[in-house]
Amino acid sequence: MEFLHPVHYGDHVDISVVVEKVGRSSVQIRYDAKVKGRPVFRAVNTAVVVDMKTFQPTPVPPWLRERFEAAME
């Protein structure tokens, strides 16, 4: 997370969420926050799909991949 400018109590924060990349077993999501059009923070999150028994990475299920890829368009 990168903090760019302070946010104060009462500020209206607009946050955009963008799917940047869908990998074999992961998805990368970017968050950009602004107050009155001024960037205040940005962050990137990578989530990995894992097998619930082994906790090893496993491919993103097709139904979920379709939704993430649709969000990229």
Image (cartoon, rainbow, N blue to C red):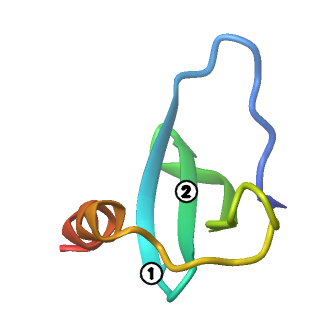
Quadrant, the N terminus: bottom right
The quarter of the displayed image where residue 35 is located? top right
Q: Residue at x 19, y 67 (%)?
A: 70
- Please state which of the two labelled residues, at mark 2 or mark 1, is closer to the viewer: 1
- The residue type indicated by label 1 comes to Val
* N-terminal-most mark, 2 or 1: 1
Classed neighbour count for the residue bearing mark 1: other residues with Cα under 10 Å, few (<14), some (14–19), many (≥20): some
- The residue type indicated by label 2 comes to Asp
Q: Nearer the viewer, residue 24 or 28?
A: 24
Q: Nearer the viewer, residue 58 or 4?
A: 58
Residue 23 % position (x, y): 50, 87
- Image position of 44 (left or right of 23): right
Q: Which residue is mark 1?
A: 22
Q: Residue at x 26, y 60 (%)?
A: 67
User: What label does residue 67 carry, if any?
Assistant: none
Residue 15 % position (x, y): 49, 43
- Image position of 73 (left or right of 11): left
Residue 56 % position (x, y): 78, 75
Question: Which residue extends farthest top?
Answer: 10
- Image position of 46 (left or right of 3): left
Q: Using the image, determine if residue 10 lies above or below residue 5.
A: above
SS for callout 2: strand
SS for callout 1: strand
Quadrant, the C terminus: bottom left
Q: Residue at x 30, y 71 (%)?
A: 62
Residue 16 % position (x, y): 43, 50
Q: Using the image, determine if residue 6 lies above or below residue 64.
A: above
Q: Using the image, determine if residue 60 lies above or below residue 33.
A: below
The quarter of the displayed image where residue 45 is located? bottom right
Q: Are marks 2 and 1 in contact (CB under 8 Å)?
A: no
CA distance for labels 2 and 1: 19 Å
Q: Which residue is mark 2?
A: 32
